[in-house]
Amino acid sequence: MSVEAREARQPWILLSPALSAVALLLFVPLLFIVVYSFWLRTATGADQVGFYLDNWQEALTDAFYRDILLNTLKIAAITTLVCALMGYPAAYFIARSKGNKAILLLLLMLPFWISYIIRTMSWINILGVSGAFNSVMLSVGIIDEPIQMLYNETTVILGLVHFLLPFMVLNVFVSLDGIDTNLEDAANSLGATRWQAFTNVTLPLSLPGLAAGGLLCFVLGAGTYITPLVLGGPTDAMFANLVFEAIITQLNWPLGSALSLMLLVVLGALVLIYNRYLGMAQLMKGLG
Amino acid sequence: MGWNLVRIWTILVYTFMFLPVAVVVLLSFNASQFGSFPMTGLSFRWFVELAQNEAILRAFRTSIVLGLLTAMISTTLGVLASLALVRYKVPGSNLISTLLIAPILVPEVVLAVALLLFLNFLQINKSFTLLLLGHVIFTLPFVILVVQARLVSIKRDVEEAAMSLGASPRQTFFQVTLPLMLPAVLAGALFAFTISFDDITGTLFWKPGGVETVPTQIFAMLRNSISPEINALGTVMIVMTVGLPLLGLAIARQVAKKSGG
């Protein structure tokens, strides 16, 4: 073999283990569940191989699934909005702070490393009947009876915000950090107030970071299923809970396949729209 | 004025992030037999109980073995792929990068279902292997992102200098490139370990009956109520997941300093 031919083959040899892993463990299984979603669960508990539209019909027309899907998207949207409102000013502060940016950023990333399940359940210690909030309020005498604040949609959103906020801050920070501060000074010297310089110069330039953070918060929030189990009430199931129910509890794999594909299509469409306008490179900056 | 508002807002955001975690640590030293307020005194008894809880210790062993194997496999695959993408002109490298990152973009529940059903179809039942394969596939993108970012900043010149002095490609890789990229390789491995150690969504789909990792064990314990033992376990986890990466970071810095990177 010539040197050139060997040189040309080299990268493919290096890439092949990772590419085969992704192909065999992600793409082939995804194609497989597309096929599976057309099979049929029979009364005997065996799956009938074939091309049946029953699962799709059920998944797409049953109001139960539709309502939970819409509710899931609503919860994800509110979570994203709250993350943006809380995270943007914090990211701005870190990016423009005169102190040690790295330390400030690291501090905010610490909770990101703390176990998700621990962080989720930690809110029970704060908001539970015998939690920190009630304990303080009782001892100060503001309330006479402990208030039950847990296990509703609001606490699900709270838990999700706590989980996803670092993603938002990191993405906005990366974006703000890349903006030349001279631009704001230039706007100021041309007569803009600090607020005008921010809204007309800095904010528009940081929108890609905000969009990247927003996409991550939305997609991760909409795909969650532990948070509603730990912090939600009996009626606060999100779409991923339905998938788990169908697959693990009822062992109705064809229906579970159809439901997971529905979630994939809805969230995938968002990722594609995002990619069309902003490109994946922006998203990778914040992740890496 | 405006800046002070931003400052106060930021302090509130940090408080929001840290308060619940601080309360977990505080309550884990509660002498009371309930994992809640009011506190009746300070005590280490829950940590002692924890150290004697056979189920939790087993979960720890499972999680550590799983995390180490995941880190080893996905770091190896990730380093090889990053080398190819950064050091060679590969046709369609943008597409390839996107394909390799794809596991992050697919909702974890969907990835979990797809992998579970597919391997089951191949008659590979739920097992530790399935758990391992699942963890590898969704930690791989993170390793690639971290290693690639570092590799881009290592100049090709040093490698070419080594080659022009007579080093073989293999020698160049092991004596020049690898030491320079070591901090990123360690960071990638640590990242993979931490993500694997923390994962619960995929793990609940993939784990065979009777096998628990630390997060699924905590989740199962939460079914009853929040016990002081869970808070103690939470504290141990916090020390591990915050302490280990910080230690890793410090080591990586030292290594980087010594090798002049």
Image (cartoon, rainbow, N blue to C red):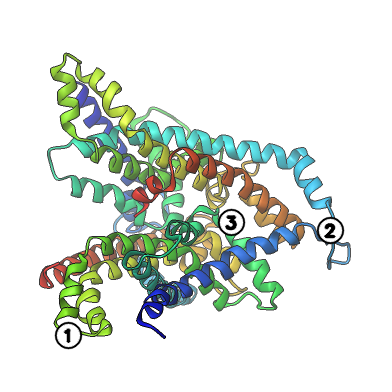
Number of the front mark, 1 or 2: 1
Q: Which residue is mark 3?
A: B109
Q: Amino acid at mark 1?
A: Gly
Q: Is residue A198 above or below residue A23?
A: above
In the picture provided, is A6 more to the left or to the right than A24? left
- The residue located at (79%, 52%) in the rendering is A55
At mark 1, the secondary structure is loop
Which is nearer the eye, B186 or A269? A269
Q: Amino acid at mark 2?
A: Phe
Q: CA distance from mark 1 to mark 2?
A: 63 Å
Question: Disc 1: which chain?
Answer: B
The picture places residue A83, in percent across and down from the top left corner, at 41, 37
Q: CA distance from mark 3 to mark 2?
A: 24 Å
Q: Which residue is mark 2?
A: A51
Q: Is residue B207 above or below residue A266?
A: below
Mark 2 is surrounded, within 10 Å at the Cα level, by few (under 14), some (14 to 19) or many (20 or more) other residues, namely few
CB within 8 Å, label 3 to label 1: no
- The residue located at (46%, 51%) in the rendering is A121
Does the image show residue B212? no
Mark 3 is surrounded, within 10 Å at the Cα level, by few (under 14), some (14 to 19) or many (20 or more) other residues, namely many
Quarter holding the N terminus of chain B is top left
Q: Amino acid at mark 3?
A: Val
